[in-house]
């Protein structure tokens, strides 16, 4: 019996839900990039961390990070070459902190759970991104 997979740690939610193709595209299919695959690409290619540093950030072993990264690269290449939309959702993850979005000004921020107002516009209309992304990972 295989061991249960540990949740991968994400520092922050992605700022987009995915990417769409311009021009002719294969509308019948979409490629789903898991949140932990997005995080691996972000840490390694955007933040320029080493694999050791990125593995520590995600609380996984370096070989596990390599497998996650390889899967992510294959999915991005498939979406680009085959003209498919790329959706970011699902996977086995947890956020490092509580993240929120203001419904009024659309600001994204992290804060203690007891704070109830947007730090940008002081609106009380805030939505938990942790709950939103966790719910979308089960769909």
Image (spheres, rainbow, N blue to C red):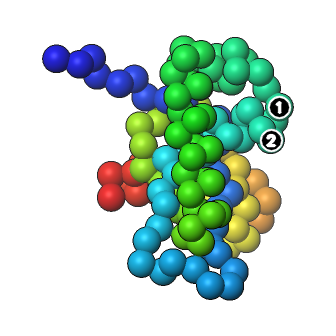
**Residue at 40% from the left image edge and 23% from the top image edge:** 6
Q: Which residue is mark 2?
A: 46
Query: Is the C-beta separation of discs 1 and 2 under 8 Å?
Result: yes
Residue 24 bears which disc, if any? none
Q: Residue 5 in the image: x percent, y percent?
A: 35, 24
Residue 5 falls left or right of residue 58: left
Up the image or down, 5 lies above or below 90; here it is above
Q: Which x, y percent locates residue 133?
A: 47, 53
Label 1 – label 2 distance at C-alpha: 5 Å
Residue lying at 68% horizontally and 40% vertically, measured from the top left: 41
Query: Residue 109 location, x and y as percent?
Result: 70, 50
Does residue 27 sit above or below 114 in this rendering?
Answer: below
Front position in the image: 54 or 109:
54
Percent coordinates x, y for residue 105 in the rendering: 73, 71
**Figure quadrant of residue 114:** top right
Taking the image as drawn, is residue 106 in sight? yes
Position above or below: 92 against 77: above
């Amino acid at each position: 019996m295989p061991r249960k997979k540990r949740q991968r740690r994400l520092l922050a939610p992605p700022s987009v839900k995915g990417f769409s193709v311009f021009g002719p595209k294969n509308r019948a299919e979409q490629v789903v990039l898991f949140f932990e695959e997005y995080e691996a690409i972000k840490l390694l290619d955007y933040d320029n961390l080493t694999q050791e540093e990125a593995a520590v950030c995600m609380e996984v072993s370096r070989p596990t990070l390599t497998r996650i990264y390889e899967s992510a690269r294959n999915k991005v290449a498939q979406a680009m070459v085959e003209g498919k939309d790329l959706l970011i959702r699902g996977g086995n993850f947890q956020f490092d902190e509580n993240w929120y979005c203001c419904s009024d000004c659309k600001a994204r921020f992290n804060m203690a759970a007891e704070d109830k107002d947007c730090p940008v516009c002081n609106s009380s209309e805030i939505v938990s991104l942790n709950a939103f992304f966790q719910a979308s990972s089960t769909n």
